[in-house]
């Protein structure tokens, strides 16, 4: 399996919109496996293909890994088909915005339809961290990052910090 490089902000590739997948092939399953290994290696709980420069609507997640055992989840063409009016606030992070966190308000509960690892249609009712994380990952597929949900002032502070860190890293 391959650990893929993760794109970090600011980068125009994080603003691109991913395209639906026609069928879940062996090649896609191999790529999902690489995405999952990349996510585990980075100690994340989710990863969208856009974050590794691939414009397909693919997401991997494991919200259980901090409790010990692994419970990987694979979402192909995930789509929110219902969202609650009730909202929830969660302190979000992002592997593409390393070291940056902010409170994000999102629907508390969502129903998501998707294809699973075997290409079978599925639907889940998500709440708590699962709902937050799947919405965060679907945002990535639509060229949106969590700082797009916060005030412009806070967003500018975070993006300026990341830009400076990239400049300093490039000068090393
Ligand atoms: O998409 C990503 O960049 C992955 C991201 C998922 C996420 C975390 C928290 C809220 C919403 C979405 C991360 O895994 S960030 C890093 C992380 O490991 C983490 C941060 C906060 C809580 C739990 C894990
Ligand atoms: Zn993210």
Image (cartoon, grey):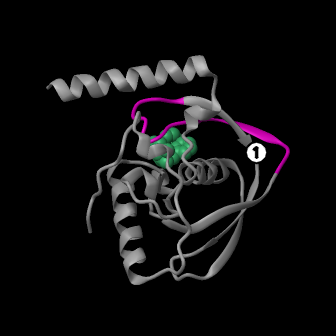
* Circle 1 crowding by C-alpha within 10 Å: few under 14, some 14–19, many from 20: some
For the point 45% across and 63% down, the residue is: 70
For the point 55% across and 52% down, the residue is: 137
Q: Position of residue 172 (x, y in %)?
A: 14, 26
Residue 96 covered by magenta stretch: yes
Rendered-image quadrant of the N terminus: bottom left
Q: Which residues are magenta?
A: 84-101
Residue 68 covered by magenta stretch: no
Nearer-the-camera pick, 111 or 142: 142
Q: Position of residue 113 (x, y in %)?
A: 69, 68
Instruction: For mark 1, give the secondary structure.
Output: strand
Q: Position of residue 133 (x, y in %)?
A: 59, 50
For the point 34% across and 48% down, the residue is: 6
Instruction: Please tell me whether residue 76 is drawn above or below residue 50 in the rendered image.
Output: below
Residue 95 in view of the camera = no
Nearer-the-camera pick, 128 or 85: 85
> As drawn, is 67 to the left or to the right of 77?
left
Q: Quadrant of residue 37?
A: bottom left
Q: Magenta-highlighted stretch: main secondary structure? A: loop
> As drawn, is 47 to the left or to the right of 121?
left
């Amino acid at each position: 399996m391959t650990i893929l490089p993760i794109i970090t902000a600011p980068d125009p590739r994080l603003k691109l919109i991913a395209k639906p997948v026609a069928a879940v092939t062996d090649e896609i399953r191999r790529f999902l496996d690489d995405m999952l290994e990349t996510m585990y290696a980075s100690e994340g709980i989710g990863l969208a293909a856009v974050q590794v420069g691939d414009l397909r609507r693919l997401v991997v997640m494991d919200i259980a890994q901090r409790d010990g055992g692994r419970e990987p989840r694979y979402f192909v063409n995930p789509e929110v088909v219902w969202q609650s009016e009730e909202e929830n606030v969660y302190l979000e992070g992002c592997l593409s915005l390393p070291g940056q966190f902010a409170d994000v308000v999102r629907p508390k509960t969502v129903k998501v339809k998707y294809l699973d690892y075997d290409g079978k249609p599925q639907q889940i009712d998500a709440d708590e961290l699962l709902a937050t994380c799947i919405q965060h990952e679907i945002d990535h597929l639509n060229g949106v990052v969590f700082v797009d949900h916060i005030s412009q002032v806070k967003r500018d502070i975070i993006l300026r910090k990341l830009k400076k860190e990239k400049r300093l890293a490039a000068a090393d």
